[in-house]
Amino acid sequence: MPTHPTKEFLVGCLVLAAVLLMFAFGWLMGLFRPFTGTAEFKVRYAFAGGVEVGSPVRVSGVKVGRVERIDFVSGANSDETIELLVTVGRRALPAVRADSKFFINMAGIIGERYVEITPGSGEPLASGASVRGIDPPRIDQLLSQGYGVFGRVQEFLEQNDEVLTEFLKHMKSFVKDANQYLGSGKNRQKFFALLENLEAVTGDMRSVTGGLRNPETQRVFDELREVIRRANQIDEKALKRFLQEEGVRARIF
Amino acid sequence: MVTAIGAHTLRILSHPVEIAYFFTQFLKLLARQLGTGRFRFRQTVDQLYSVGVESAGVIFFSIGVVSLILVLEFSFHMKLVLHQDSLVPAFSTVLLIRELGPVVTALLLVSRVGAGLAAEIATMKITDQIDALRLLSIEPFDYLVVPRWIAVWLAAVLLTILSIGVAILGGATIAAIKLGYGFGEYFNSMFTFSHFSDLIGCIIKASVFGNLLPLIACYHGFKAKPGSEGVGMAATSAVVEGSIVVILADFVVTYLFYTL
């Protein structure tokens, strides 16, 4: 190296520094990874939820890779229309197992989308494996449907404005009358007595129905059902003739 | 009056035509140099040193200060609207790569190099040095313009890349001192919104600016009027026109590259 840098040396430094910086930018931006091994997984979804090429891939919240490619596919399962090719850094591979879940989540104040892989406990997932991801919720559809429902409710309210006003007016009047009625002590006592009687009746009913829920009652019901089934099989004409022969004159048929 | 309007119109129209002719001359002579293997390497390296290495200090200092302001302003605005400034590294980096890096570098090169080139060639013209070159059978355009042109072009691209690096370092430093960011935290999140295509766009911009700058500077140098006043006017015109052209070209390249 010369003691006093020459023009050529300094120009060379300028060029070299710029080229090295370009490589550094390319590396930091994920264009290439010369020093780290990665595994690739194909993750299929019915709905990608806004994830893009370059979106981060995280395992337990730690960024370990990125979405490399997004393809449209038509497979055996008709609902799977999107396939993401994601890369995961070697250091995170032990956590990615056969039972790991691949979610599409949203982070940050501007809603950045990313693929979140939950650690599993099954067999390690081999590089190149194809897995089914968990579709993100369709917030847009939910909002759209909610908008439709609210629209119909509003339409109903507008169309039945008079009826509803009348109904509310009557309700108000009814509540007012009830309040007045219960306001006097005598009526209040009657009302509470009524409630007590009602409670006693429901208690009795409960006791009766409880009594019916035993094997003996069940047997009686079974026999009754059998009798009805047999009665259904009796020939209508034969039964009529039998009743007439027996002198039954009732207007059954 | 009609004659004056006509003369003025012709002067305005002739300007871009002359510059276009100038550009075709450059391409023709560059092709000849490369074709005959008589590329003026020595002169090009000298010019690259003069334009690139000697401009580096002023450009790095300026872009460094710009990055400090950028980070502080982004933090202020994000806190104003979002009540937090976690996206400052990502936003400031993407703006640096897409806009400020190439444009600030080009404007500083216009001020320093554009004026210098125009004044140098204008002085050579008014002191008949260009005619002397012709007498020596040296094509002045071939000898003076082509090496400078290539040097400015290369220097614009190299300095833009390096200035982005310096600006990122400056931004990370002020973020660490003033905003409480760690360097690792800053570097981890700074490329959230930046893609390599943005960097390619940045290099294309720098390349366009690096071509326009010597074109305008050399043109005004060759067209300089006699006398010291002519030299001054050539330098001034090179800076003013160069700055306007850089800003216009920035809009055109941004529109073509990022919106189409």
Image (spheres, coloured by chain):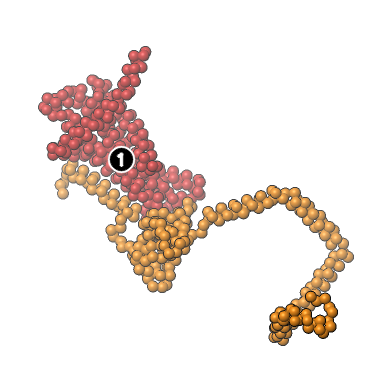
Chain colours: A orange, B red
- Identified at 22% across, 38% down, the residue is B151
Q: Is residue B65 visible?
A: no
- Name the residue tied to disc 1: B206
Q: Is residue B7 visible?
A: yes
Judge whether B241 appears above or below B201 on screen: above
Farthest right residue?
A186
Question: Taking A79 as reference, is A184 left or right?
Answer: right
Q: Residues within 10 Å of mark 1 (few under 14, many from 20)?
A: many
Q: At which x and y percent is residue A127?
A: 34, 66
**Closer-to-camera residue (B105/A37):** A37
Q: At which x and y percent is residue B121?
A: 22, 28
The part of the image, by quadrant, that contains residue A44 is bottom left
Secondary structure under tag 1 reads helix
**Closer-to-camera residue (B11/B146):** B11
Q: Amino acid at mark 1?
A: Ala
Question: Taking B246 as reference, is B141 left or right?
Answer: left
Question: Total label count?
Answer: 1
- Identified at 33% across, 44% down, the residue is B201
Q: At which x and y percent is residue B187?
A: 36, 53
Q: Say which chain tag 1 marks.
A: B
Farthest top residue?
B1
- Identified at 87% across, 62% down, the residue is A184
Q: At which x and y percent is residue A154?
A: 66, 50
